[in-house]
Amino acid sequence: MKIAFQMDPIGDVDINADSSFRLAEEAQSRGHDLFFYGPDQLAFQEGRVTARGRDMQVQRVAGDPAILGALREVDLGDFDVVWLRQDPPFDMSYITATHILDRLAGQTLVVNDPFWVRNYPEKLLVLDFQDLTPPTTIARDLDTIKVFKEKYGDVILKPLYGNGGAGVFRLDSNDRNLTSLHELFTGFSREPLIVQQFLPDVSAGDKRVILVDGVAVGAINRVPAKGEVRSNMHVGGRPEKVGLTKRDHEICEAIGPLLREKGQVFVGIDVIGDYLTEINITSPTGIQELERFDGVNIAAKIWDAIEGRL
């Protein structure tokens, strides 16, 4: 097959952690041809969806993860699969890319399906499953947020479209910074904020569960560094081997059919204690850590699902 990866610069990836690299590596091992381009090189030209990029061969060499060919323009309608794999922020640039990739429907399989990537942002899709999630409010209005904080006392405040743990604050019952933080966030963004009841279970870890075509295939636990509430690995979170609990399976069985129906082949959900907190579909991670802990080829499962759809 002809496979295109729309992603951030391939030369910057960590070959031992990056999920896009691992997906490309598995595709290459199956004999598929790879093409790389950045989101800025995506275009709609008189009825065609095109990209300017380079043929790619990946290699597990630190600091030199790919051999790239000469720059050329391709018609993405000639490809079998396009991977939408650039990292957030989920901004208007990201949204526009999903609109352009929508034009490939019926010609090329885009993974994950861009229509639903656009309409199911990670912190909003969970609102469809309120019985699985902690108490949550999404608002820009300060008084609304204050009422929520007064009700629950200890809360997490973060940007609605943030990512990677950036801008996440815990405000306990003694905190006096809510108004100042609201001024800070609303001073540079028109977006709402999301506020959730703080879950003390986060000290034991924030579990990343990987689903392939709506089915759970494993999980890793991400334990926050001492003094942190954020478990994201690039801010010091420590990955640990962990199994799936009965509650994890209940959550996955509840959300899996919707993910499968909407073409969300590779999804990573976040679970703290008994609660679902995010459904990550834009550019989920965790494949390589899970493969090392469980000894299972997760990338192969993902490609099996894609090849099955084709």
Image (spheres, rainbow, N blue to C red):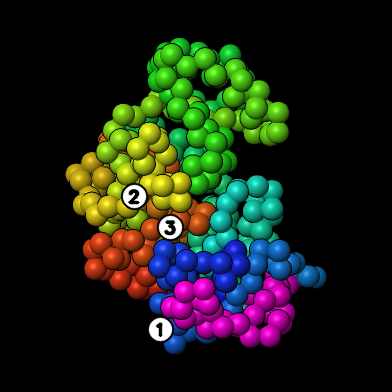
Q: Which residue, given by chain and number where applicable, does mark 1 sit on? A: 29
Residue 276 visible to an observer of this rendering:
no
Element marked by disc 1: helix
Q: Residue furthest right?
A: 46
What's the mark number on residue 41? none
Q: How crowded is mark 2: few (under 14 residues within 10 Å), some or many (20 or more)?
A: some
The magenta span reads: 48-77
Element marked by disc 3: loop
Looking at the picture, tell me which residue is in the foreground, 78 or 209: 209
What's the mark number on residue 285? 3
CA distance for labels 2 and 3: 14 Å
Q: Does the magenta stretch include residue 51?
A: yes
Image vertical order of residue 21 relative to residue 150, above or below: below
Counting from the top left corner in percent of width and height, residue 213 is at 37, 61
Q: Mark 2: which amino acid?
A: Arg
Q: Mark 3: which amino acid?
A: Thr
Asked whether, in this view, residue 101 is left or right of residue 63, the answer is right
Quadrant of the snapshot with the C terminus = bottom left
